[in-house]
Image: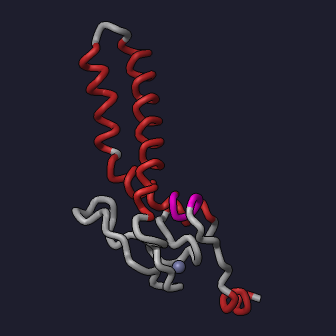
């Protein structure tokens, strides 16, 4: 599994096999994270408050969504429909909030945290 596939599927940053989240994004408990990886026993919260940094990643997502939908709405509606434009800009940000939450934590773990990918030696010996 490549790193991008591991991020898309919310897999462990070290072994890329264990799940990070306990349920799907559609569940009411979409934010629940396993304490440790089921495969390699990696503790996901590296240090207390580690996931606070995911707010900054989420902030980047929100700004990108707001600017993109804002430019598109302004392109089609112009200046004449201000409240409709505001509604069109805010709606995707609200609808994508769960996706933003989950991907911000996953990206933090994979790209911005101290955890490095470790090839499973037993798996490599079995393959060769
Ligand atoms: Zn793992």
Colouring convention used in this rendered image of the protein: secondary structure
Spot occupied by residue 85 in the image (x, y as percentages of width and height): 31, 20
**How far across and how far down the image is residue 99, in percent?**
38, 52
Q: Can you tell which quarter of the image residue 96 is in?
A: top left
Q: Nearer the viewer, residue 42 or 7?
A: 42
The x, y position of residue 45, in whole percent, is 44, 71
In the image, taking residue 115 as reference, residue 82 lies left or right, namely: left
The quadrant of the rendering that contains the C terminus is bottom right
Above or below residue 113? Residue 77 is above
Q: Choose top left, top right, bottom left or bottom right for residue 23.
A: bottom left
Q: Residue at x 39, y 78 (%)?
A: 35
- Position of residue 111 relative to residue 89, above or below, is below
| Position above or below: 20 against 41 | above
Q: How many marks?
A: 0
Q: Residue at x 46, y 80 (%)?
A: 37
Residue sitting at the far front: 48
74 horizontally vs 12: left or right:
left
Name the residue located 44 percent from the left edge and 15 percent from the top edge. 75
Q: Which residues are magenta?
A: 108-112
- Closer to the camera, 54 or 84? 54
Q: Residue at x 38, y 76 (%)?
A: 34
Question: Does 53 lie within the magenta span?
Answer: no
């Amino acid at each position: 599994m490549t790193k991008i596939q591991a991020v898309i599927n919310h897999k462990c940053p070290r072994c890329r096999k264990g799940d990070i989240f306990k349920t799907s994004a559609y569940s009411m408990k979409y934010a629940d994270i396993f304490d440790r990886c089921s495969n390699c026993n990696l503790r996901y919260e590296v240090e207390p408050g580690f996931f606070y940094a995911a707010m900054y990643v989420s902030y980047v997502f929100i700004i990108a969504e707001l600017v993109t939908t804002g430019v598109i709405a302004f392109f089609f509606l112009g200046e004449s429909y201000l409240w409709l434009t505001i509604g069109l800009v805010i709606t995707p940000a609200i609808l994508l909030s769960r996706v933003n939450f989950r991907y911000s934590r996953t990206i933090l773990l994979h790209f911005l945290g101290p955890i490095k990918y470790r090839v499973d030696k037993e798996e490599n010996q079995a393959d060769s």
